[in-house]
Image (spheres, rainbow, N blue to C red):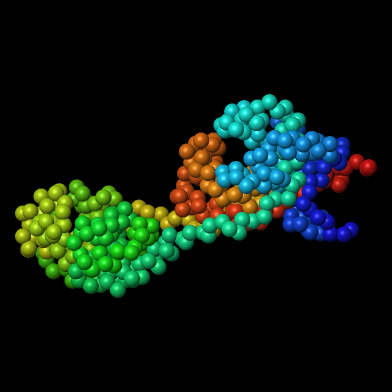
Amino acid sequence: MKTIDLVKLLIGRKASKPAITLLTLAIGVGTAAIAAAQITPITPGAGASDFKPLFVKQQDLADGKRLAETTCVGCHGQNGISTTEGVPHIAGQRSVYLYTEMKAYQSGERRQTIMGNVVKYLNDAALVNVAAYYATLDPPPPNTSAATLKPDPVEAGEAAAKSCGGCHGEKGVSKIAGIPSLVGLDPKYLVSAMQAYKSGRRNNNVMKAMLANVSDDNFKNIALFYALQKPARAVTPSPGDQAAGKAASAACAGCHGDTGVSSSAVNPSLAGQDAQYLAAALADYKNGTRTDDTMKGMVSALDDSARKNLAAFYANQQPAAPNVRKPLTAAEWSQRCDRCHGLKGDSVDPHIPVLASQRPKYLVKALKEYRTRTRRNNEMAAMADALSASDIDNLAAYYSRQKARPVLYIVVPSQAQPK
């Protein structure tokens, strides 16, 4: 038997006990590959009425096509390929998914005025037929014009931090007296500090010049990179009386922690910090070069010796990593999505939609709606909650660039009746 074209849905075959098998296959796969494939029968029965679109006949498909061409084409485009922002492609989409989603619009479970009004008066047979019709169409081509994936934030942070390594150490552990370490700091604090240098609120011309052209996104990336590095004490001298410094530190513990490890994003950790930098910062708060009313009051009674003692105590404490998790890369997120949506977004579960070749802005919109609970699905809401805005954009761009594959539905030969 010749190699077959697997774009279309095999339908209309009768079976004594209908059992449909589905495979996601590329066009032009040979019949030998089908025979060798691992396949699982779907046998509709009690509680499985949503499988009805898998069992339509040719006349049902023709009816579905007529309905689609008079009712759906205005939004979803000719042949189910949308040309409207925010409106999904539905060509080649899984028929059971399309059917159940139209039922959800009809019942009000999914709230969208236009779709609700379109399907409101359609009977069940019409929904079945139009869902099956769209499933037979060629999927849209990959969206090669979709935005490129944003770089991994940790990798971007490491790249942006290259210019910082000369002073602050390659991994943010200072080896130069008077230069602060950047490890062990909450990213929010480090971002605010960099922004203060850039704006001039912190008076340091070298830092202001270094950060002049750094974007807010890269501030976040740099701060994340340093937050994920192994914390270590600065490799610099720490002259001073540590015992005296420990006694004086009691007044600082409320904000900076007993040993200088802060539990607040607003207040920096001091443990392991370069001693000369700490002493100079305390002097700057006292003389007003660095403005902070709380700190000014706290250090007003400290002389030069007391500042050195306090700095020596903190410099010799063990820093700790802030409570920050390494974000997943776009590749890692897509692997999680693929568990349900199929390899590269080609779903093999008729209930779960294909993501491959979908409009990226529609995918962004859908994920945001899951996150705000505008669209209700517990599993998707939990996934969306963990995604950053950058993650959402990356996933949408990634899946829109993948090639959607058609699904072949076949009657299991052993159960088919002779023609």
Residue reaching furthest right? 419
The image quadrant of residue 144 is bottom right
Residue reaching furthest top? 121
Q: Is residue 271 left or right of residue 68?
A: left
Q: Look at the image and tell me whether residue 238 can be seen.
A: yes
Q: In the picture, which quadrant includes the N terminus?
A: bottom right
Residue 292: image x %, image y %? Answer: 16, 51
The image quadrant of residue 75 is top right
Instruction: From the viewer's side, name the closer residue of 252 and 8.
Output: 8
Q: Is residue 138 left or right of residue 281?
A: right
Q: Is residue 125 left or right of residue 302?
A: right
Residue 382: image x %, image y %? Answer: 50, 42
Q: In the picture, which quadrant includes the C terminus?
A: top right
Which residue is at 74% across, 55% downward?
25
Residue 283: image x %, image y %? Answer: 11, 60
Instruction: From the viewer's side, name the closer residue of 137 and 297.
Output: 137
Which residue is at 64% across, 36% downward?
101
Residue 256: image x %, image y %? Answer: 21, 52
Q: Is residue 60 above or below residue 265?
A: above
Q: Look at the image and tell me whether residue 269 can be seen.
A: no
Which residue is at 62% across, 50% downward?
358
